[in-house]
Image (tube, rainbow, N blue to C red):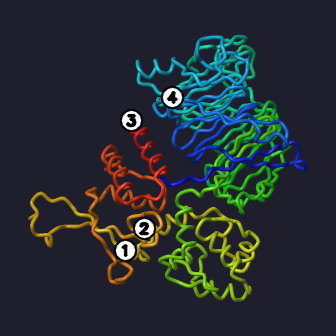
Amino acid sequence: MTNQKKETITFGYLESMSKNFFHSIKTPFKSPIRMLTSGNSNICFVLENGECWEHKLAYSASNFGLSEFIKHDIEPIDRCASGYSHYLLISKSGSVYGRNINSFHYGQMGSGENISFTKPTKIKFFDKLKKEEGIEVVDVKGAVYSSFYLCNNGDLYSSGYNNSGECLLPKWNQNYFTPELVSKNVKKIWGENYSWKAFFQTNDNKVFCKTNSFQGNPRFFEVSSLPIFKDQIILEVASSCSTMLLLTQSTNSEKQFLHYTTDIYQHSTYHKVDLTRVNSPLKGISSSQSNFLTTTQNNDIYCVRNKALHQITNGVPEMEGEFNRERYVACSCSCGFSASVVPSSKCSISNDLLQLYQNQTFVDCEIAQGIKGHKVWVELRLSKTIKEIQETILQAQWGKEKIDSLMHWVYSNSYRGIKQIKEFGGLTSNPNLYKNSIKNDLLALYKNEETKNFTIKVKIDDEDQDEENEEDEDFEEIPVHKFILIARSGLFREMFKTLNENEEDNSVKDFSGKTPESLEIFFKYLYTNTLELTADDDPQLTAEELEDASEYYQLTEKISLQNEIRKIKKQFKL
């Protein structure tokens, strides 16, 4: 078994922008973290292998990391969410679990009982709903003392504290200990651990929260109807006890807006946060008691305080020699604390490409100072020919260390040598240099048929074909890039050690026995880490063949593919 590096968790206390501190600790996990959520005093982790762990937060820098990590002995978990003093879990089988951190219980566990759960306990209401009506919970969110459950048919349920409509339920001044139906045709929900408000979005993109009318008449307030949101779609909502942050996008363009308000109901209280310093689209926001965190698509981290945006990425200390922004997994706040995950080990595509560069195997061009790379990839990433890159490096009088830092960015988006990267960016005026463009570049590479230099020949089944005459066999050809196969597949890596001796060998026959359609999807996955099925694909057959193909071709990292296959099975209810 291959030993996996443990992950590093970074905690930051955002008491004030002048007093930020971050402290990193090692986890005992043997599987990468897939999701985390933090409440008032605890952080809940869901790992790629389905394990669920819990860690108690400390309230001072000197105590960070002293409390133990607790593993919960329950079935494999798919996702998690936190309220102020509780968290919710959805298992991979579709069951819902609740866990109370302290004695505050108002029905947020949805168990039907006025008790606390000292360990994750199954909410039987949803098991019964699934068994009798086939309705399954697909997302959960927590507010201060409330819980929200979104089902696969668009039904939204809630339970817990409803003194003034916090659960979005009609009867105020009471607690709901059993989940009750809130609304139908819902596609998204938002809830925060330190907010009394939850928000939901319907299929027609309208966003609602609890009403500000006495005794819930009307029950909901339509946030999206405010004039400030004219010609905008609300993408994300985060709320603390007294402030809200909303991320929107224009209906006519890709332009984004960040709205800060102290009163969700009053149009005059909304202020637009200045995003001119942000050079990549925003992708997520979360809140704590006194601040908001937001991340960009290139995983810069910003703090929003008092309507102002502050970049805090550079405040995170180096972990194992570098802080690689692409490794940032999650952003979750609690009572002034922010928690992010920075895995020591790289994610699948970046890790595979970086290892390919570091091993200097199967390289086909020299960059400078004896450092070599893969021509088609280096030229695509830097938007220059190898000759132009060499001239730029020569003009800048770079040494080997700076060139190596540049190549780390080319192969993994690593900013370990950020000063050198910016210097090179200034010389080349390359607008893509500062973006997390590795995914887009890999997709562009996949679509570039002209630069593909290797062919996979997949046999087409033909019942009328003479089995004894191999020359009559029909094959479908799948063109690919050789260096992608080497980086991502153990089978091809070994194969090319032999094929490299004969440069005329630019194709190979596939003997996996899978259909050309499934293998086309598989080889595209090697570039994108996502699975895309067409209307003509058989989901059941494709899922089975992709699992077999990952074993046959010895995929270097199977967790991401397994997650994608699991999404397909869930989507088509396989």
The residue that mark 3 highlights is 573
Going 81% across and 51% down the picture, which residue do you hit?
309
User: Residue at point 37% right, 74% down?
Assistant: 454
Rounded to the nearest angstrom, the CA distance separating label 1 from label 2 is: 9 Å
- Mark 2, Cα crowd under 10 Å, few <14 / some 14-19 / many 20+, is many
* Residue appearing at x 32%, y 74% in the figure: 507
Element on which disc 2 rests: helix
Q: Are marks 1 and 2 in contact (CB under 8 Å)?
A: yes
Determine the CA span between mark 2 and mark 4: 38 Å
Does residue 116 appear left or right of residue 77 in this picture? right
Sooner in the amino-acid sequence: mark 3 or mark 4: 4
Can you say whether 189 is above or below 356 in the image? above
Q: Which residue is mark 1?
A: 454
Q: Percent x, y for residue 154?
A: 50, 29
Q: CA distance from mark 3 to mark 1?
A: 36 Å
Could you tell which of marks 2 and 4 lies nearer the N-terminus?
A: 4
> What's the amino acid at mark 2?
Leu
Q: Secondary structure at mark 4?
A: strand
Q: Is residue 38 visible?
A: no
Amino acid at the residue labelled 4: Val
Q: CA distance from mark 3 to mark 4?
A: 13 Å
Q: Are marks 2 and 4 in contact (CB under 8 Å)?
A: no
Which residue bears the numbered disc 2? 485
* Rendered image: mark on residue 137: 4
Image quadrant where residue 450 sits = bottom left
